[in-house]
Image: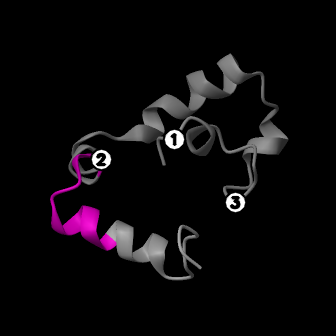
Amino acid sequence: MVGQPGFFDLSDRYAALSAAGDPLERLAAVVDFEVFRGPLIVALGRSESSVKNAESVGNALFLVGLK
């Protein structure tokens, strides 16, 4: 199927980005994104119960692409 991503394409893409020196990986090594969790929870209007589960969709850092 031409044009449709395969099962391993995403992991291959991440590996290629890492090998090329992914700037987000370098940034994550320097910046503690957890500092932003509290203000993001307030700004997004999330309740504490929806944020307690790190795997939930309510994870504020995940929603804004910081994690």
The amino acid at mark 2 is Leu
Residue at 67 percent of width and 28 percent of height = 41
The amino acid at mark 1 is Gly
The percent position of residue 27, horizontal first and vertical second, equals 25, 43
Tell me how far mark 1 sits from mark 3, CA to CA: 14 Å
The segment highlighted magenta reads: 15-24
The mark found on residue 54 in the picture is: none
Residue at 51 percent of width and 41 percent of height = 65
The amino acid at mark 3 is Glu
Other residues around mark 3 within 10 Å, as few (<14) / some (14–19) / many (≥20): few
Q: Report helix, strand or loop for mark 3.
A: loop
The percent position of residue 38, horizontal first and vertical second, equals 59, 28
Q: Which of 18 and 5 is in front in this view?
A: 5
Tell me how far mark 2 sits from mark 1, CA to CA: 10 Å
Q: Report helix, strand or loop for mark 1.
A: loop
Q: Name the residue under label 1.
A: 65
Look at the image and tell me in which quarter the N terminus lies: bottom right
Q: Name the residue under label 3.
A: 55
Q: Relative to residue 1, is residue 10 drawn left or right?
A: left
If you read the primary sequence from the N terminus, does the residue marked by circle 2 or circle 3 appear first? 2
Q: Which is more foreground, mark 1 or mark 3? A: 1
Q: Report helix, strand or loop for mark 2.
A: helix
Residue 60 on the magenta segment: no
The mark found on residue 24 in the picture is: 2
